[in-house]
Amino acid sequence: MEHASDHPRQRLTLLGATGSIGRSVAKVLADAPGRFQVEAVAGGRDVAALAETARALGARFAAVADPKAGPALADALAGSGIASGAGPSAVLEAAARACDLVVSAIVGVAGLAPSVAALGAGRRMALANKECLVAAGAFFMAEAARRGVELLPMDSEHNAIFQALSAAPARAVEKVTITASGGPFRLKRREEIARATPADALKHPNWSMGAKITIDSATMMNKGLELIEAHHLFALPAERLDAVVHPESVVHGLVSFVDGAVVAGLAVPDMCVPIAHCLSYPDRFVTTSRRLDLVAAGKLTFEAPDEARFPALRLARAAMAEGGAAPTRLNAANEVAVAAFLDGRLSFYGLTDLVEETLARLDGAAAPASVDDALALDAEARRLSEGLLPKFAAKAS
Ligand SMILES: NC(=O)C1=CN([C@@H]2O[C@H](COP(=O)(O)OP(=O)(O)OC[C@H]3O[C@@H](n4cnc5c(N)ncnc54)[C@H](OP(=O)(O)O)[C@@H]3O)[C@@H](O)[C@H]2O)C=CC1
Ligand SMILES: CC(=O)[C@@H](O)[C@H](O)COP(=O)(O)O
Ligand SMILES: [Mn+2]
């Protein structure tokens, strides 16, 4: 049986260390004592959590994005020997430090520049941040290839598909399917969903995650973003990508081959499973994660997504089909809308209405060919969405 101590130490950098994925990575690291040296950790503004994580993981460097948080972080790390920095440049510095594996788990398009900086250092990357692929997928994949960086999908569906794809050569793949839990409103009528509050939408049936992705799961925008993510990660056209609702979240992704065979990835809904895969790849190590018990699971059920009650899926598919700047703008408008919904400034359907109207008002433009391009398109769409907020705010219940 494989044990962590059988392997040489690898240097690991954790971007988004204080988040839901960051905490799960820390849990998996505890299952692999002596296997990793944590090079750097980075977070947004939660100084206390970042310092605690840096100390617990024995990191060499800690970076906080909030430029004003430098003195507080240095104070919190006093006596630890851990160097620190603050501001976006410090996060880029953390990302670019030489190491063997970077875990990219900052939420939102804020993760794009640090993830690209990490590619610049030429290493393996475990990618949880899906927004960087939605906002700049063609550029990001080309940059990873140019730098010779191996991308390991950490998002649960894509991780399952990555594992299933190893069953046959790429030319034998007919179709890839990702599953969706259906979120907390799967069985609700449209009128009930329209009245959903942030507290209702934050009650995910199967996964414990950060607020942004949890709202995306409730609207099913998460599945739309994941279709675009899969399009880039696996170089598959939209018509060979499918999403199916699977309320148990046990089957995460499926690959259908040209001979009719289907290989699926199954596990309990716990991010520690795909995280362990990425951290041990191409090997495996023993973990304490809960095991799948199919008899206890009982039934595994599947149903078609309902785009009438969950229009985000239709919007994301349309943006993927249009290509160019549309996915970048979809992502930007969605980030504005999710923040506004969480603040009580938008109703649940106001959220997707805002995204739709933002996209409708912008003329087609080329896909971003750099981080700057992507961030300029992102900023333009954000300005427009923010400007449109009052129109949709009136609909808030
Ligand atoms: N959670 C999950 O199970 C899954 C998540 N993902 C994806 O992984 C990513 C992270 O999700 P999740 O962990 O849930 O999110 P969380 O909101 O829980 O955590 C976000 C992390 O990003 C940090 N952060 C925010 N802004 C910045 C910034 N400008 N610079 C540096 N760090 C920043 C936060 O720091 P701070 O705490 O200080 O704000 C925190 O560490 C998302 O893209 C999500 O879609 C994919 C699959 C599953
Ligand atoms: C854990 C993970 O990968 C999430 O993206 C999850 O899939 C979200 O749940 P939904 O299937 O409800 O979007
Ligand atoms: Mn997912």
Image (cartoon, helix red, strand yellow):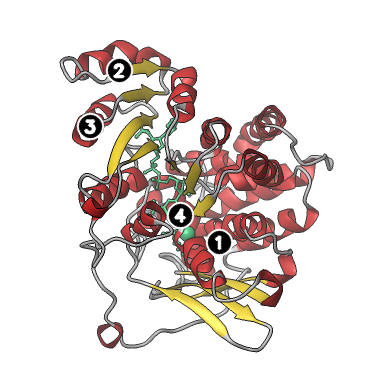
Residue hosting label 3: 58
Locate residue 288 relative to residue 24 in the image: left or right.
Answer: left
Instruction: Indicate if the residue with disc 4 has its beta carbon within 8 Å of ligand 1.
Output: yes
Q: CA distance from mark 1 to mark 4?
A: 15 Å
Locate residue 382 relative to residue 348 in the image: left or right.
Answer: right
| On screen, residue 285 above or below 175 | above
First in sequence, mark 1 or 4: give its number. Answer: 4
What is the three-letter code of the residue carrying label 2?
Ala
Instruction: Indicate if the residue with disc 1 has its beta carbon within 8 Å of ligand 2.
Output: yes
The dot on residue 223 is: 1
Residue 160: % across, % down: 47, 67
**Local secondary structure at mark 3:** loop
Q: CA distance from mark 2 to mark 1?
A: 39 Å
Residue hosting label 2: 83
What is the three-letter code of the residue carrying label 3?
Gly
Q: Residue at position x 60%, y 37% from top?
A: 389
> Looking at the image, can residue 178 be seen?
yes
| On screen, residue 209 above or below 366 | below
Q: Residue at position x 29%, y 51% from top?
A: 7
Locate residue 290 relative to residue 367 in the image: left or right.
Answer: left
